[in-house]
Amino acid sequence: MRITSQLFIAAFTFTFLVLATNAHAQSPREQLNQMVQQLQKTPSDNALREKIIKLAASIKPALAIPDEAVRYTGRAMFVFKTAKSETDYLDAAREYERAVASAPWVASYYADLCTIYEKSGKYAEAKRACDFALIGTTDSSQAIELKQRIAGLEIGIERNSAGAQAQRKQDEFSGFLKSIEGAVFRTSQNRGWIEQITIVNGMCKGMAIYQDGTSHDRLPFKPTSFVTEYLHPGGSSPITYTFLPDGKTITTDSSYGRIFLRVN
């Protein structure tokens, strides 16, 4: 009899706890609202943003979009359509970010934001937005399109990295030096001599030619870019050599021979 009473009490306690838990359980919509409020306080919490997008996709019927978000998207699209500069596109992005903050579960908002950031040349930000759009899409064809856009943005990020840009500039200058191989540049006569630069094997071979016909070789140096700063041995300060891309002129900031014109 005592064991039966204990079993009855245990069963009653368990049932009471289950009912109490269910009574306090949040609905998906309530959970989403709470998560959105938290995200607005910590907008950099990408894991929470992803949870919001996934949870919203499971709620039927779909959540209503707040009037505030609708207003910001309207403002953003107007700025985007009339944009003429990178600054304009970034202004449009800021308006759309406000719409996303109001309704962070709307996948199409992220797709639009991706487009705006891409137009402004902000490829990393565009990819982040496309990633969130992909999480929220349920259409297979849209998913494929978003994956393609993400792949394109990835190569855009790679090509616009500081290292990649520096390499392209280096390759451009190397090609330029090859195109002017053997070229001779001279200054006008200055204080009794002429400065001459000859391009030999990618090096600048310098020479001072005096009025009496004698000459003096200067130590060669290797230019590394269209604007190259070089400290000659024995010099007190570096000289900046600027090569014009047309291959016809070299200028310096030295006190002599400021302009070298191509003579061959």
Image (cartoon, rainbow, N blue to C red):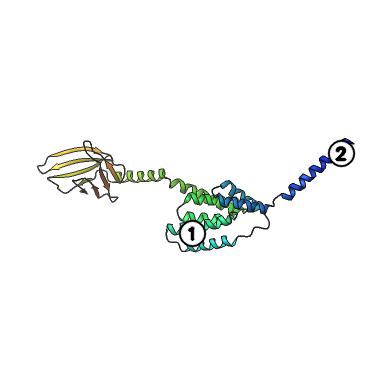
Q: Residue at x 84, y 38 (%)?
A: 7
Task: Judge left or right: residue 211 versus residue 78.
Answer: left
Residue 115 in view (yes/no): yes
Residue 159, compared with residue 95, is above or below; it is: above
Q: What residue sits right under mark 1 in the picture?
A: 92
Say which amino acid is labelled 1.
Ala
| Residue 109 image position (x, y, % from top left) | 56, 56
Amino acid under disc 2? Ser
Q: Where in the figure is residue 156, as x and y percent of width and height?
A: 46, 49
Which of 86/27 is in front?
27
- Alpha-carbon span between mark 2 and mark 1: 70 Å
Question: Which mark's residue is nearer the viewer, 2 or 1?
Answer: 2
For the point 64% across and 52% down, which residue is it? Answer: 32
> Which label number is shown at residue 5?
2
Tell me where residue 90 appears, x and y as whole percent: 46, 56
**SS for callout 1:** helix
